[in-house]
Amino acid sequence: MNAPPATIIVPTRDRPEMLGRALATLAAARRPGDEMIVVDSASVTPATADVARAHGATVVRCDLPGVNRARNAGWRAAAHDLLLYADDDVTVDAGWAEGLAAALEAHPTAAFVAGRIEIPAGQEDAPRPVAVRTGSRGERLTAESRGILGHSASLGVRRAALARVGGWDEALGAGGRFKSSPEVDLFDRLFAAGWEGWFEPSSLAWHDQWRDDVDLLRLDWRYSFGSGARIAKLLRTDRRRARAVAAEVVWEQGLRDAARNARRGYKTPTALALVRVVGAAAGLVRALPTPVRDGHFVLRG
């Protein structure tokens, strides 16, 4: 039996060519009964909406930028209870939508299903792959799971679960005050609410590795800044998980990685690891004074 229909949601801002490539594959993966929503996150030109409509998507407009604001607008406009998120810089396999939706049906205790994300052919030697989640076996995800759980670039979520935790935190992610960590913050809150997750390898996407060295350095800063904000929030909501995340971000991905690369004489990787530590500290300091209510940062002004 096929899984129930779902709503495919793609947040985007001023990247019409990239969006067009993504939507061409998402349209091919779309099943009868599925709907597709493109959330235009305050694009400057009308090209975004034109490309979306040309691929059969409904357009929802946000007048203020922010990827999590766009993701919230998408699920609140959706007609279905199963929500499938994709980013505009991914392409997907024809079975992508069925894989995520079927996994949500098969695992009723899972609030979210993370899909497999690979590097596109011809980009295998990317200097540092971004937003990739590989593996060939399904995996139950819990608050005890470590490492990369999944990415919002390819993610299935239940509407009921999102509604229970108040949706995505709009202070996080691209365009938000704290720049990054949108999906891991969502996972934190879903785990705290008693849900689990699932990794589903049959749902396959490819994430375009389009960033150059300068873009990667900026991205590392944003990732680490967002991680620091995530730790600041967890210190108020879940101190045990805050300690685990801090150990992973500051020690494993930061100081230990820097020391290992320094011993090998790798100057650039050493510098990037130290940038991650400094970024996490900056995000922590910036976010600690920010109030948290019902699991969300409360921004003033």
Image (cartoon, rainbow, N blue to C red):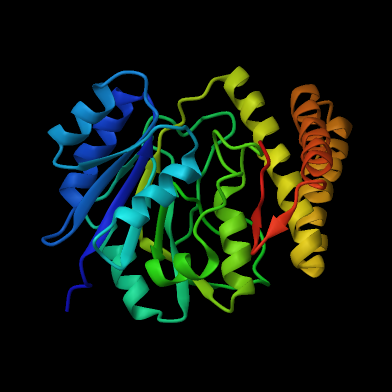
Q: How many marks?
A: 0
Q: Position of residue 168 (x, y in %)?
A: 52, 54
Comparing 300 with 168, the one in front is 300
Seen at 79% across and 62% down, the residue is 236
Q: Which residue extends farthest front?
A: 301
Q: Position of residue 104 (x, y in %)?
A: 36, 72
Q: Position of residue 133 (x, y in %)?
A: 50, 52
Left or right of 176? Residue 281 is right
Seen at 76% across and 36% down, the residue is 276
Q: Which residue extends farthest left?
A: 32
Seen at 76% across and 47% down, the residue is 290
Seen at 22% across and 72% down, the residue is 3
Comparing 27 with 81, the one in front is 81
Q: In this rendering, does residue 189 appear at all?
A: yes
Quadrant of the image occupied by residue 27: top left
Q: In this rendering, does residue 138 appear at all?
A: no
Which quarter of the rendered picture does the N terminus lie within? bottom left
Which quarter of the rendered picture does the C terminus lie within? top right
Comparing 146 with 67, the one in front is 67
Quadrant of the image occupied by residue 12: top left
Q: Position of residue 43 (x, y in %)?
A: 37, 25
